[in-house]
Amino acid sequence: MNPALETLFLARQELPEKGGATLFLGAEAHPDLAAIPRLTACQPLKPLADSCGEMGVEISTVPDSGEFSTILFLPGKSKDEILAGFARAHDLLAPDGVLLVSLANTAGASRYEKELKKVTTLLSSFSKNKCRAFCVDRSKPWDAATLDAWRELARPRLIPDTDFTVEPGVFSSGHVDPGSQLLIDHLSYSVRGHVADLGAGWGFLSQAALKKLPNISRIDLFEADARALSCARKNLPAEAPAGFHWHDVTKGLPEKYDHILINPPFHTAQSRDVDLGKAFLSVAAASLKRGGSLQIVANRQLPYEAHLLELGLRPRIVIETGVYKVISA
Ligand SMILES: C[S@@+](CC[C@H](N)C(=O)[O-])C[C@H]1O[C@@H](n2cnc3c(N)ncnc32)[C@H](O)[C@@H]1O
């Protein structure tokens, strides 16, 4: 289990009994989750949302308004998203509600605890499992100017020199991923027909492919992060022949495609990450129509060619830079 999740639930036992409704931002499956009364659970990442669903906990979108007596917050990694999350939680708390946050020490637990302390009084702090859970209370004064500044961080921002807008916290929220740009620059004009984009993010690859290749009749975007997918919906023109799927690619695809574009998640050589990338390639290979192709960009040290050969495909390096390689298979 995620140690920050475990620490969050240990610290929750120490909270004063509040009754009322609970909001869980960044919800993950925990044995105590289903027993929380009047729970609204929010989780943008499909695999984590599915794990909650498997234990009977329904996932909702983050409410625009409400008065929750308890908010549990298990943040992601982006600073803007975390600070904006604090402000969002403040705005959704009942007048005497409490906010409990848990983070791994390596994810900046003490730094974010200090940020919250700057804005209001800290009620408690609890350390366990190399994580820290800290708690604040809505009834204490909060600094209005800092809250306003944090609310601003939630706003979608324009990617410089483009028309794309992106929310904080999603992959490559400040710029076009150079790997994806390389893939587009070298994307073969033979890519046509019904195309899929696996791990589509905020829509760069799909939009750029539709623009470059008029023979694409339709493109299906598959993305695990609901926030990124919602940006992609806005970043592609309303009339674009595109389908948007909040989907865990490792579970397979619902149909077969003429060509599939892939910038697999993560660019590190850690085995967990490489396995996820390989799972993407396996699913893609199983979802290709006869004569179709995979168009992949990856960090050049990642061992994807051998895996593609095992899958019965013929990989060819289209271009290799100091950092990336584009593979057609
Ligand atoms: C390297 S990024 C590429 C994003 C996008 N194609 C681009 O060019 O900017 C990989 C994407 O895969 C998504 N992802 C990670 N795991 C996933 C999964 N199991 N199913 C679907 N998408 C996933 C991530 O959220 C991320 O947006």
Image (cartoon, rainbow, N blue to C red):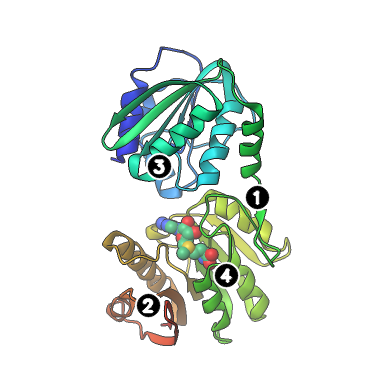
The dot on residue 108 is 3
Residue 97 % position (x, y)? 52, 18
Beta carbon of the mark 4 residue lies under 8 A of ligand 1: yes
Q: Residue at x 43, y 43 (%)?
A: 49
Q: CA distance from mark 1 to mark 3?
A: 24 Å
Q: CA distance from mark 4 to mark 1?
A: 19 Å
Residue 10 % position (x, y)? 31, 25
Q: Marks 4 and 3: which is nearer the front?
A: 3
Residue type (three-letter) at the residue carrying disc 2: Arg
Residue type (three-letter) at the residue carrying disc 4: Leu
Q: Residue at x 33, y 61 (%)?
A: 273
Q: Quadrant of the N terminus?
A: top left
Residue 109 % position (x, y)? 39, 37
Residue type (three-letter) at the residue carrying disc 1: Pro
Nearer-N-terminus badge (2/3): 3
Residue type (three-letter) at the residue carrying disc 3: Gly
Callout 1: few (<14), some (14-19), or many (20+) C-alpha neighbours within 10 Å?
some
Position of residue 2 in the picture relative to residue 329 (left or right): left
Q: Which residue is mark 2?
A: 300
Nearer-N-terminus badge (1/3): 3
Q: Quadrant of the C terminus?
A: bottom left
Callout 4: few (<14), some (14-19), or many (20+) C-alpha neighbours within 10 Å?
many
Q: Is residue 254 visible?
A: no
Q: CA distance from mark 2 to mark 3?
A: 30 Å
Beta carbon of the mark 2 residue lies under 8 A of ligand 1: no
Q: Which residue is mark 4?
A: 205
Q: CA distance from mark 4 to mark 3?
A: 32 Å
**Do callouts 1 and 2 mark residues in contact (Cβ within 8 Å)?**
no
